[in-house]
Image: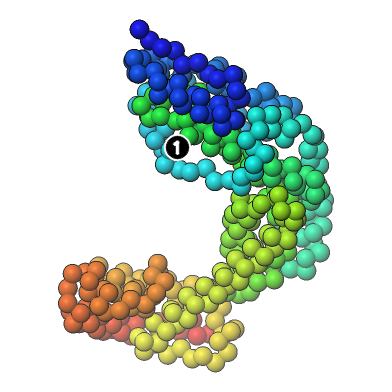
Amino acid sequence: MTTSISISSEPVGSELAVAKIRHQANSSGGESAADAIRHEDEPAVIPARAGGWIRASELAAALTAIEPYLTDYEAMEKDELVRRTKIQLRHEISFIGNKEFADSKRGEVVFASPLELAEPKTAAGARIVSRSGSDLPIHLGRLCEAPLLKPEQEVMLFQRMNFLLHQAAVHRRLLNPKRPSRARLALIERFIALAHWHRDRIVEANLRLVFSIVKKFVNGNNPFDELLSDGIVALIRAVEKFDYDRGFRFSTYATQVVRRNAYRTVVLNQQERQKVMGGLQDMNLELTDEGSESSISETRWHELRRRLAEMLDELDRREKLIIRARFSLGPHRKVRTLQALADRLGISKERVRQLESRAMEKLRLMASDVCLAELES
C-alpha cells in the first residue's frame, strides 16, 4: 500500500507550505523509493504550485531570455539527478532577506507593477567614451549604452532579484537525494536564472560608474582592461550584497566598493613589482632605482618577469618552492620562514637553508648568462 504525497494548497513560497510538504514526505514510510520519485517527479505539479506570479507578463522577457540555457531534467537518469541534487545542497543560495517575502501573496505584489526599462542607446555610449579624454577604444562605449535606472526601477529590480533567490532557497530546503525531483531541480534553476537576469540589468545600468572610477587609476603599470574586469566583478558582488530596503541609492554604495577594489588592485600590483625587483637585486642584477616610476615600460617589465620565470623553471621542485616562498613570488602572498618551509617539506631548517643557498647560486649563474641589454634602453 502506498501513500501519495499531495502538494499543500498553501503557495510553495510560504513557510507553512514548506513545513506541510516536509511533514507529509517524512510520514510516508510505507512508500517505495520508485513510487516516491514518481509522485514527486510529475513535471506539472510543482511549477503549477510555484505561484501564479511566475507567469506574470513582467517575467515574460526574462523567461524568454533564460530558456535556452536551462537544463533538461526530464531526460536525465536517476543517478545524475541524485548527483545534481547533492551539488545543489552543497551550495547555499545567498540573498538579502525581507520579512515580507514570507507572505504567500508577495509574488503577485512584487511583479504587479511594470518595470519599463528603457532600450540601450548606442550613441550615448560612444559619446561618453569620446568625452572621457582617455585614449580608449570606441567599442568600450557598449559598456555605457544601458540607461541609468530611476530610483523606483532600482528598488523593483533588487526586490525581484532577492525574492526569486528566496523562492529558490525555499525549494532547495525540500530537496532530498534519496528522492530526487526533476521538477523541483528545474524550478530552482529557473528561479536562480531569473534572479541573475534581474541582477544583470542592474549591473548593465551601472557599468558606466565602473568605467568612470577605474580610468582614474590607469597608468603604465595598471592597464585599463585589468582594472575594468576587476571593477565589474566588484560591482557584481556589490549588487549581491546591497540591501535595498535601507533607502540608499545603490550608486552610493557601489562607488565605494569599486573605488576600494581598484585601489587594492593598484597596491597589490605595486607590491608584486617591489617583490620581483627585490628578488632581481638579490641575484646581483644591476637595476637602479633612478626614475623608478618611469624608467621601465610595461613591455620591458613583462619581459623581466618572463625571464625570471624561465630561470625558476630550471630549478628542481623543492628549490623552486623555497625561492617562491622565501621571496613571496607567484601565489605566495607572504614571505615564509625557514622553519615553516621545513615543516612543510618534512626536512630540517638547516637543510632548507642549504637548498635556498644552492638555488640562489644557480640563479646567479643563469642571470650572468642572460642578456638584458634591450631592457636597459
* Residue 319 percent location from the top left of the image: 25, 73
- Per the image, label 1 sits on a secondary structure element best described as helix
Residue located at (49% from left, 34% from top): 172
Residue 119 is at least partly visible in this image: no
Residue 47 screen position, x and y as percent: 58, 22
Q: Is residue 148 left or right of residue 46?
A: right
x and y percentages locating residue 227 in the rendered image: 61, 64
- Nearest the eye: 9 or 231: 9
Crowd around label 1: few <14 · some 14–19 · many ≥20 (10 Å): some
Is the residue 163 above or below the residue 356 in the image? Answer: above
Count how many numbered circles sit on residues in the image.
Answer: 1
Residue 180 appears in view: yes
The residue located at (44%, 30%) in the rendering is 175
Q: Give the farthest residue toward the top.
A: 1
Identify the residue at horizontal 54%, vertical 81% (top origin): 296
Q: Image quadrant of residue 76?
A: top left
Q: Nearer the viewer, residue 220 or 375?
A: 220
Q: As drawn, is 352 to the left or to the right of 370?
A: left
Q: Nearer the viewer, residue 162 or 60?
A: 162
- Residue occupying image coordinates x 47% and y 30%: 174
Which image quarter is the N terminus in? top left
Q: Position of residue 293 (x, y in %)?
A: 58, 84
Judging from the image, the colouring scheme is: rainbow
Residue position marked by numbered label 1 in the rendering: 88
Give the vertical position of 164 relative to 263 (above or below). above
Residue type of the residue flagged with mark 1 = Gln
Which image quadrant is residue 28 in? top left
